[in-house]
Amino acid sequence: MTLWSVQWRSRSKLSGARRHLIYREGLPVLFRTRSKARAFIAKEYGYIARRKGLRAEPHGWRMPRPVRVRIVEEKD
């Protein structure tokens, strides 16, 4: 099954480049469509685009991106 998730991104001299999926309540945030993932990003993380201080050092935050993820069920 292929779904969409949200990838956190940051890049700073102190920490280097970092990327990871965003989790809520112990599970990755998943969406059926890219547009729903983008709407979530705008609602929850839109303030990053307006705050230059968060994008500059030492934070280096970037706007999260929608990414396609594949869910694979494995049997033991």
Image (cartoon, helix red, strand yellow):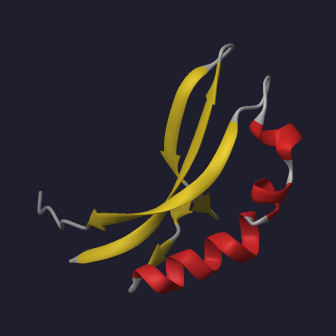
Name the spot of residue 50 as percent of width and height, x first.
Answer: 83, 58
Name the spot of residue 58 as percent of width and height, x first.
Answer: 80, 23
Q: Quadrant of residue 67?
A: bottom left
Name the spot of residue 72 as percent of width and height, x first.
Answer: 18, 65
Name the foreground residue: 22 vs 41: 41
Q: Quadrant of residue 32?
A: bottom left
Rendered-image quadrant of the N terminus: bottom left
Name the foreground residue: 46 vs 27: 46
Is 72 above or below relative to 22? Answer: below
Is 60 above or below relative to 42? Answer: above
Q: Residue furthest left?
A: 75
Residue name at image x 55 percent, y 76 percent: 38
Residue name at image x 57 percent, y 43 percent: 9
Name the spot of residue 18 as percent of width and height, x first.
Answer: 53, 32
Lateral position of residue 41 relative to residue 33, left or right: right
Lateral position of residue 56 relative to residue 29, left or right: right
The number of numbered discs placed on residues in the rendered structure image is 0
Rendered-image quadrant of the C terminus: bottom left
Lateral position of residue 50 relative to residue 42, left or right: right
Lateral position of residue 36 relative to residue 13, left or right: left
Residue name at image x 88 percent, y 38 percent: 53
Is 46 above or below relative to 32? Answer: above
Residue name at image x 82 percent, y 41 percent: 54
